Amino acid sequence: MLAFVKCFSLKRTKHPRGYEDPHVLASETPFTVNEIEALHNLFKKLSTSIIDDGLIHKEELLLALFRNSSMQNLFADRVFYMFDRKRNGVIEFGEFVRSLSIFHPYTPEHEKSAFMFKLFDLHGTGFIQPHELKKMVGALLGETDLEISEESIEAIVEQTMLEVDTNKDGKIDEEEWKELIAKNPSILKNMTLPYLKEVTLAFPSFVLDSEVED
């Protein structure tokens, strides 16, 4: 009997820290079970690119996004912060799937809008201050090939605050942000990654060994 128990225990799959049941994640996100399995294979590639511990560290995220693990980038810092929901300095698989689901085409726009608001709310005060807006606009423009002067960024921030800060308290609150998005829905364009709707097609080799059927 003891030998049988030992044999059974050896066959159990050992999952790394932070792993969550694909069925649970599928029930909480727009992804199917098979798509989550595909994402787990992607996650494993990212989480072993520098430190092989089954967790995504900031350097590994930077390497994936910018092919540079040591660069300084506010936008990448904010994305990492938003994905690291437990605030423990690493991204676990469950956090990866839930955060990535925000960019799914089927995710409601109000959820994408709320995520983006928090991305810009650098200090977590529930408001976007002018200096926070300036930093994020500068970081986002820095990822393009456009060469924009400090004065131009200042002008963008000033004009945005003039139009969005309707109660004139010098900051943007969540309601004012919602109004901005309603008038300019294209702001959320980068909050949708079309290929997430067909993850198993985007990463076909990841699902050939799928053990679970939807």
Image (tube, rainbow, N blue to C red):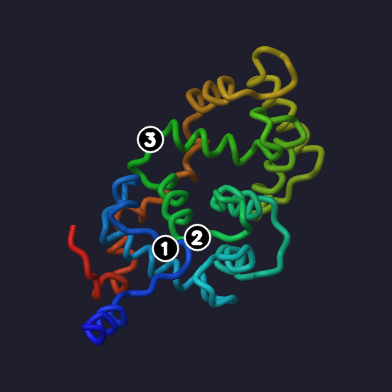
Quarter of the picture containing the N terminus is: bottom left
In the rendered image, the residue lying farthest to the right is 151
> Which of the marked residues, 3 or 2, is nearer the chain's N terminus?
2
At label 2, counting other C-alpha atoms closer than 10 Å, the crowd grade (few under 14, some 14-19, many 20 or more) is many
Position of 115 relative to 56 (above/below): above
x, y percentage for residue 139?
A: 69, 48
Whether residue 2 sits left or right of residue 190 in the image: it is left
Whether residue 119 sits left or right of residue 134 in the image: it is left
In the rendered image, the residue lying farthest to the front is 1
| Residue to which mark 1 is pinned | 19
Whether residue 35 sits left or right of residue 112 in the image: it is left
x, y percentage for residue 168?
A: 72, 14
| Residue to which mark 3 is pinned | 108
User: Does dot 2 land on a helix, a strand or a loop?
Assistant: loop
> Which of the marked residues, 1 or 2, is nearer the chain's N terminus?
1
Q: Which of marks 3 and 2 is in front?
A: 2
